[in-house]
Image (cartoon, rainbow, N blue to C red):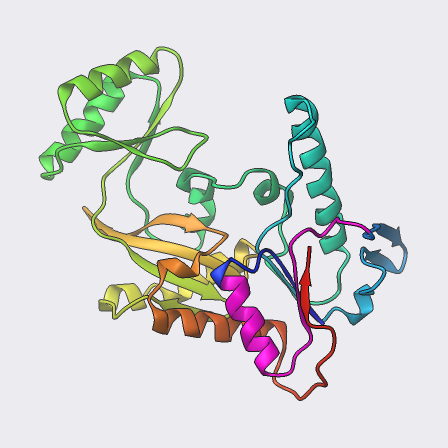
Amino acid sequence: MNLLLGHAEDPCCAGVFARLEARGRPVRIVAAPLAPPAKLTWRLDAAGLASSLHPDAPDTAITGVLVRDTGWLEPDGWDAADHAYMQAELRAVILAWLAGLACPVINRPDAALWYRPGAPLLAWRGLLLRSGLPLPEVVVTSDPAEARAFRRRLAADGVPGAVYTPLAEAAGYLLADDEAWERLATLQVRAPVCLTEPHGAATLACIVGNAVIWDRALPPEAVALEPALSRFAAAAHLAFVEIALAPVRRGLAVVLVDPLPRLEHFALPARDRIIDALVALLSPERAVTPAALGVLS
């Protein structure tokens, strides 16, 4: 049986569910993994790690898991601090359960991704560089003079501004005029800032297992990056990841990493290939008898 941790409204979950069901594979969408009668049993001994969560779905019967969501604790009736604590504890339970599964898990999360969704590109920078992927020029500084020097370098190459990105967020803000740079200098008195060169229109790639699936026809320099993209996904332990590449001053560069790919970002032909690749990872081609099909809430 395959489990899809997520929601039926998610195009990825819905597409994988439909494809597996059409092939006679037992599959469930699990919207709330810890809803009753769930009970975590977790054992670590000399034989290794084992876990169990659902009495009606023993872990030995699970052939694959796709992680799209971890469930949500409704905040009604909770103090804000207590709710944040309990949400973190619930995620820890799911993390422990997934760590004990012997079947393929896409994407089996680590703690850093689990508790820090939406990490900025800066958080992936070291791993991207070690994988051989080009990146935009970045300056992290609390010195206004260093920020102005970066601005001059960009201007010398015909780039009129830079992008400011908070160190803890992925959203960026274009610094296009003197007033914006003056506000940035005021901010630097209190904290360092991250500045990146702007980029052009992005092209999307989705890595699923060993497959690199592009959203559209690409220039040769993009195709040449496929081995490095695969190395990055393997090093990050992500069997399913969305990466955006875009032109910068020195050529094509990675400008976004999303460990929770969104099918709606891709055109229909690419969506079909992504779903086929996910199904191949979850359930290798073989005939089975349909079993428990449905949605758990």
Q: Is residue 280 visible?
A: no
Between 3 and 291, the one lying in front of the other is 291
Q: Is residue 291 above or below residue 251?
A: below
Asked if the magenta segment contains residue 14, the reply would be yes
For the point 53% across and 60% down, the residue is 234
Looking at the image, residue 269 sits to the left or right of residue 29; the answer is left
What percent of the width, then of the height, locates residue 236? 54, 53
User: Which quarter of the rendered picture does the N terminus lie within?
Assistant: bottom right
Residue 32 in percent (x, y) is at 68, 51
Q: Residue at x 61, y 43 (%)?
A: 114
Using the rendered image of the protein, determine whether residue 31 is visible from the camera's viewpoint: yes
Tell me the residue at 42%/61% (across/down): 263
Horizontal side of 233 relative to 290 (left or right) equals left
Residue 281 lies, with reference to residue 78, above or below; the image says below
Left or right of residue 288, residue 281 in this image: left
Residue most toward the front? 76
Q: Nearer the viewer, residue 71 or 144?
A: 71
What is the tally of numbered marks visible in this picture? 0
Q: Residue furthest bottom?
A: 287
At horizontal 69% and vertical 75% (from top left) the residue drawn is 26
Q: Quadrant of residue 244?
A: bottom left
Image coords of residue 142 (percent x, y): 35, 18
**The C terminus - image quarter:** bottom right
* Residue 230 counted in the magenta span: no
- How far across and how far down the image is residue 105, in percent? 65, 62
In this view of the protein, which residue sits in the foreground, 180 or 145?
Answer: 180
The segment highlighted magenta reads 12-36
